[in-house]
Image (cartoon, rainbow, N blue to C red):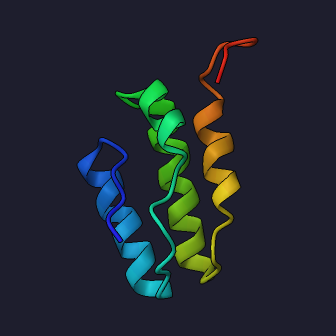
Amino acid sequence: MIDDFGDIALNRLATRYRNELNDARPPFGNLYLLELNKPLDVFIKEDLSEFFESAIANKTKINVSDIDEILEQEIPPRALY
């Protein structure tokens, strides 16, 4: 699977996570949320990086809805999505 967060370093980290944990699920991140947030804010990049690094270090499979929650943090209240 290829993940496209719009950031090379973050894409590589997601690929590293997938390789180390043998996770072949569909691409991470709600496509609509990714489009709303492109380009990703530096804080979202940091949060996603920490999220993937923690999963790699702990060797735990991620919950995809957690990625969506990180992406949602920059959407203004009452925004339609």
55 vs 66, left or right, is left
Residue at x 50%, y 81% (from the top left corner):
23
Snapshot quadrant of residue 73: top right
Residue sitting farthest toward the left? 8
Asked if residue 18 can be seen in this view, the reply is yes
| Above or below for 14 versus 80 | below
Snapshot quadrant of residue 19: bottom left
| Above or below for 65 versus 15 | above
Asked if residue 41 can be seen in this view, the reply is no
Q: Nearer the viewer, residue 55 or 35?
A: 35
| Above or below for 55 versus 21 | above
Residue 70: x, y in percent? Answer: 62, 41
Residue at x 63%, y 77% (from the top left corner):
61
Looking at the rendering, in which quadrant would you find the N terminus?
bottom left
Residue 60: x, y in percent? Answer: 65, 80
Residue at x 46%, y 37% (from the top left corner):
34
